[in-house]
Each structure stands twice: as C-alpha cells, then as structure tokens.
Image (cartoon, rainbow, N blue to C red):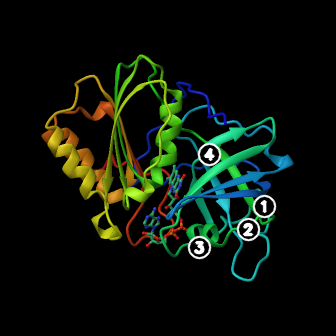
Amino acid sequence: MTNPAAANTPTIPLDASSPAPARKRRPPRRVEVIRIQVLSPAMRRITLRGQELEGFEPTAPASYLKLIFPEPGQLEPTRPLPDGPRPVSMRTYTPLAVRPETLEVDVDFVLHGEGPASTWATQAQVGQVLFLMGPGPGYPLDTSAAQHLLIADDSALPAVETILAALPASASVQVLLEVIDAAEERPLQSAAQLDVQWLARGGNNRAAGLPLENALRALQTVPPEARIYLACEAAAMRRIRRLLIDELGASPSQIVGRGYWKLDVVNHPDHDYGEDA
Ligand SMILES: Cc1cc2nc3c(=O)[nH]c(=O)nc-3n(C[C@H](O)[C@H](O)[C@H](O)COP(=O)(O)OP(=O)(O)OC[C@H]3O[C@@H](n4cnc5c(N)ncnc54)[C@H](O)[C@@H]3O)c2cc1C
C-alpha cells in the first residue's frame, strides 16, 4: 500500500463563515468498487478502481476527494457536467492509499447512520459505480518539526494515517483519537515515534469531542514548538481550538483545524477551518 507522499504543499486557509471562493472543478472520474473490507463494526474500507483515475495523485497527506453517490432509484450516479449544478449526493472523503500503478484508491467510511455516503457504504457491493473528483489540497505538513500533536475523531482517522505515513523517524508524535469504542482501534504505522491514546466516545454522537477535550485538559500543556493537526466534529473542533489556545498555551499559528462533519447538519462544507472560534 502506498500512501500519498509527504509534501509541503501550501493550502489557503479559509474561514467557514465566508463563502468558498470559486474553485476550478476537476473532471469527474468514473470508478468501480473492486473490494470491500470490514475493518471494524463502524468502519468499511472500500477500494475503487477505474481507468479515469489516471493522473489522480494527491501530493500532501490529509488531502481529500469528492465522491458522488447514486440518488434513490439510480443504479449509477449521473456524470456531473463541468458547469452543471453541484450534485446533491456528493460528500468529502480522504484518499487513504492511492496506487497509481493499478489505478486504485482506498477510502475508509465511518458508518455513522443515515446520510447518502454512510448509507451507501453500508450496502456497498463490488461492481457498483461512483464518480470521484479531486484531489483537493491537504495538510501542509512540516516534516522538519520535531514534535507533532494529532487530534482527531474517527472521520479523520484516515487523514491522521496519511500524516503518520509521511512523518520521518526523527519526529515525536502525540496522537489522540476518538472512536466509538475499543472495537474501532487499529494498529497505526509510522516511522515516527508515536504516543497514541485511543479514547472512547460511546454510541452517543452528542458527546462528540468530549473525550478529546478531557484528554487534552489532562495534558495541561502542549510543547511550544509542536505542530498541531485537529480534525473532528465542527463544534468540537472550535471548542478544542479555544482550549488549546486559552488553557494549554498554544498559539493559533501552531494549529490547523478542520471541521470534518457537523452534528445535525447534512453535508457540512469541506473548508471549515474554525478560525472564527
Ligand atoms: C477533508 C475531509 C475529509 C474527510 N474524510 C473522511 C473519511 O476519510 N472518512 C469518513 O468517514 N469521513 C470523512 N469525512 C467526513 C464526511 O465527509 C462526513 O462525515 C459526511 O457528512 C458524511 O456524509 P453522509 O452523507 O454520510 O452524511 P450527511 O448527509 O452529510 O449527514 C447526515 C447526518 O449524519 C451526521 N454525520 C455526518 N458524518 C458523521 C460522522 N462521521 N459521525 C457521526 N454523525 C455524522 C450529520 O451530523 C447529519 O446529521 C471527511 C470530511 C472532510 C471535510
């Protein structure tokens, strides 16, 4: 399995309260499900393959792609037109592993309940078709930094894995990961030195972020030079960002925050950096 290579690709920080600037839409690529792996009760790894994946090569970890799912009653989604309306059933996911030589990409789906993406992943079968767009920009990883703090829930666990894969052996990394329960834990691979804490949220999504907040408070401080990547439920991300700054002495410039989903909100935007917090 190859992971997206590390690169210091700069991203443009965007404020979720301002409209996203018009982005050049990449052409949709038709892909087919070729493999489904049950990783844990709430996580499916789905491998997509297609000739149109040629040239799909993310250059930074924690980058993203867009998947377009069939509408109810459709066997296959409609190919979006370059200037057509935004497809309703389009959601944002992480290219966990990309294998250009076989034109494959692995995507890990949290099965959280209802939603076009989660519902589709629950019933996914080999041979089904999706459209994929991207890649979008990822985390501007500073591979020269000695210390990293990665704070994420299950939706950003694939993103964290791509960051871990890109870190050098010289890096020391504290990882806080919030999942439903111990059945969702999995081995993490990295050349870096890892200190990993798995934190159980239980089945109540309304508790999203609380285990991460409690674990951070217990740390009492964060290393002044640490690079901090924070990705989870949007309101929790804002609370944790404030906690890092107000209680743990982090500076805003150390933190890259991302709201990956939002409680009670359908299709939360992909450019929520929480800098309005
Ligand atoms: C850059 C980026 C990368 C991402 N990568 C991944 C990835 O690799 N794997 C992954 O699983 N997710 C990932 N996500 C999150 C994913 O885009 C959202 O969870 C998305 O809302 C799922 O779409 P849906 O159709 O299932 O639900 P939606 O139709 O968007 O939402 C329906 C309901 O489900 C709730 N909901 C949505 N997501 C979750 C969740 N994770 N847990 C609990 N409740 C939820 C919403 O609050 C809403 O009430 C990523 C998000 C971003 C911004």
Going by the numbered disc 1, the residue's amino acid type is Leu
Circle 1 — which element?
A: loop
Alpha carbon separation for disc pair 2 and 3: 12 Å
> Which badge, 2 or 3, is on the more N-terminal residue?
3
* Residue that label 4 marks: 95
Q: Which mark is residue 119?
A: 3
Label located before the other in sequence (3 or 4):
4
Q: Are marks 1 and 3 in contact (CB under 8 Å)?
A: no
Residue 54 screen position, x and y as percent:
81, 40
- Reading the image, the residue beneath label 1 is 81
Q: Secondary structure at mark 4?
A: loop
- The CA span between labels 4 and 1 is 23 Å
Q: Nearer the viewer, mark 4 or mark 1?
A: 4
- For marks 4 and 2, the one nearer the N-term is 4
> Which residue is under mark 2?
125
Amino acid carrying label 3: it is Thr
Labels 4, 2: front one: 2
Please tell me whether mark 2 or mark 3 is closer to you in this view.
2
Label 1 vs label 3, nearer the camera: 3
Is the CB of mark 3 within 8 Å of ligand 1?
yes
In this rendering, does residue 226 appear at all?
A: yes
Q: How many marks?
A: 4
Q: Where on the picture, by quarter, is residue 125?
A: bottom right
- What crowding class fits label 3: few (fewer than 14 Cα within 10 Å), some (14-19), or many (20 or more)? some
Of 254 and 38, the residue lying toward us: 38
Q: Is residue 221 left or right of residue 262?
A: left
Which quarter of the figure is the N terminus placed in?
top right
**Residue contact at pointers 2 and 3, CB within 8 angstroms:** no
Which of label 1 and label 2 is nearer to you? Answer: 2
Of residues 90 and 203, which is closer to you in this image? Answer: 203
| N-term-proximal mark, 1 vs 2 | 1
